[in-house]
Image: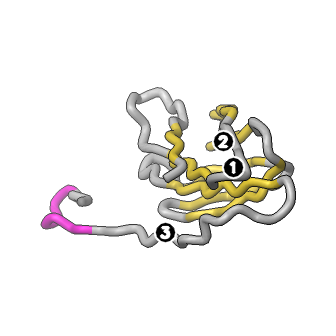
Amino acid sequence: QENMVGQPDIFSYLSLPDTMTNPSGNFGRVRVINLSPDHSSITVTMGGTTIILTKKQVAFFDVPLSNPKITVKDGSVTKNYTIPVSSITPISVYLLPEQSVTPALPIATSND
C-alpha cells in the first residue's frame, strides 16, 4: 500500500514476469527488481552488462555459475555485493528502500 501525503490511500502492485528458468549451459539467471522508492533510477552491473532500472522495473541477467559481483549505483553512491548463482534455481535480487538518511542501496535475495 502506498500512502501519499494529502491523498487517500492508494494501492499499487507490481506484476513480476515469471521467466525464472535457468538458461542452458553453465549459466544461471538473476532477476533484479527495483523496489526502492528512494531513487528515481539505479544502475545495475552484473556479468559485464549494465542496465538502468527505474522504480518498479525488472531486468534479467544470465551470468556464469559462481558467486558473481553485482554493482548497484545511484549517482555518487556505489555498492558491490556477491550473490550465489547456481544451475538449480534462479535467484531474485530486490533493490530495497533506504533504511536511513545515508544512502546504502540495500538488497535482499531470494531463490523461491
In the displayed structure, does residue 87 sit left or right of residue 14? right
Which one is in front, 26 or 57? Answer: 26
Look at the numbered disc 2 and give the secondary structure of its residue.
Answer: strand
Q: Mark 2 points at which residue?
A: 73
* Residue drawn at the location 83% of the way across and 49% of the way down: 64
Question: Do the residues under discs 2 and 3 have CB atoms within 8 angstroms?
Answer: no
Kind of residue at disc 3:
Leu
Other residues around mark 2 within 10 Å, as few (<14) / some (14–19) / many (≥20): some
Q: Where is residue 82 in the image (x, y as percent from the top left)?
A: 69, 33
* Residue drawn at the location 54% of the way across and 71% of the way down: 18
Instruction: Measure the C-alpha gap from mark 2 to mark 1.
Output: 7 Å
In the displayed structure, does residue 74 sit left or right of residue 33? right
Mark 3 and mark 1 lie on one chain; the one further toward the N terminus is 3
Q: Position of residue 17 (x, y in %)?
A: 54, 72
Residues rendered magenta in the picture: 5-11
Q: Is the magenta stretch mostly helix, strand or loop?
A: loop
Q: Name the residue under label 1.
A: 44
* Residue drawn at the location 73% of the way across and 58% of the way down: 61
* Residue drawn at the location 16% of the way across and 64% of the way down: 9
Other residues around mark 1 within 10 Å, as few (<14) / some (14–19) / many (≥20): many
In the displayed structure, does residue 60 sit left or right of residue 96? right
Kind of residue at disc 2:
Lys
Mark 2 and mark 3 lie on one chain; the one further toward the N terminus is 3
Instruction: Measure the C-alpha gap from mark 3 to mark 1.
Output: 18 Å
Nearer the observer, disc 3 or disc 1? 3
Look at the numbered disc 3 and give the secondary structure of its residue.
Answer: loop
Q: Name the residue under label 3.
A: 16
